[in-house]
Image (tube, rainbow, N blue to C red):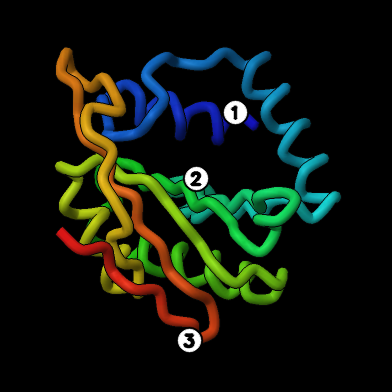
Amino acid sequence: MDDLLRFINGLIDEEAPIAMNKKITREEEAAWLEKELSSLKRGESIELVAEVDGRVVAHGGIRRHGFRESHVGTLGMGVSKGYRDAGIGTALLTALLEKARDAGLRLIDLEVFAGNGRAIHVYRKAGFRMAGRYPGKVSYKSRYVDVVLMVRGIEGRPVAAARP
């Protein structure tokens, strides 16, 4: 648990382009972990970590939507500074998509900061396409930043790209 806490708080310390902007406590991390384990048992989520020398350097998850959208999952992931551009994010994403297929998901969506070219490149390489843009959705470094919505079908199910 402490390794996951160091991982997420490290992303926050560096002001990585993620939705979270406040460090979490050990108690908050324990509550999150308990909730995630319960969600995993119910088949509502997929969670994976990547480790280097026994240390968590990346985390990714897919949360299944409910009701009429239960075939859709939302992806979130992050890679620690110093471990980016080494193929870890791509490997983690590939593994998550395989697990999503095995779980019966048909469509994966995600949101990414519009200025996060590195992540957008990885997602495009993995078959994600832009589906829309949400202007000024997040406050990041004292500015309102656009978020890009991307989608990808599973098992060769194409998803049309959004028109500009």
Q: In which quarter of the image is the N terminus?
A: top right
- State the residue at coordinates (69%, 51%): 45
- Using residue 1 as the reference point, say whether residue 97 is left or right of it: left
Q: Mark 1 points at which residue?
A: 2
Question: Label 2 to label 3, Cα distance in Å?
Answer: 31 Å
Q: Residue 56 carries which label?
A: 2
Q: Compare residues 125 and 85 and report the one nearer the observer.
A: 125
**Residue 133 point in image, percent of width and height:** 26, 45
Disc nearest the viewer among 2 and 3: 3
Q: Compare residues 20 and 59 and report the one nearer the observer.
A: 20
Quadrant hosting residue 34: top right
Q: Tell me if residue 134 comes above or below residue 141 in the rendering.
A: below
**Residue 149 point in image, percent of width and height:** 34, 50
Question: Label 3 to label 1, Cα distance in Å?
Answer: 38 Å
Label 3 sits on what residue type?
Gly
Dot placed on the residue nearer the N-terminal end, 3 or 1: 1
- Using residue 5 as the reference point, say whether residue 90 is left or right of it: left
Q: How crowded is mark 1: few (under 14 residues within 10 Å), some or many (20 or more)?
A: few
Q: Are marks 1 and 2 in contact (CB under 8 Å)?
A: no
Q: Residues within 10 Å of mark 2 (few under 14, many from 20)?
A: some
Dot placed on the residue nearer the N-terminal end, 1 or 2: 1
Disc nearest the viewer among 3 and 1: 3
Question: Label 1 to label 2, Cα distance in Å?
Answer: 10 Å
Q: Tell me if residue 158 comes above or below residue 1 in the rendering.
A: below
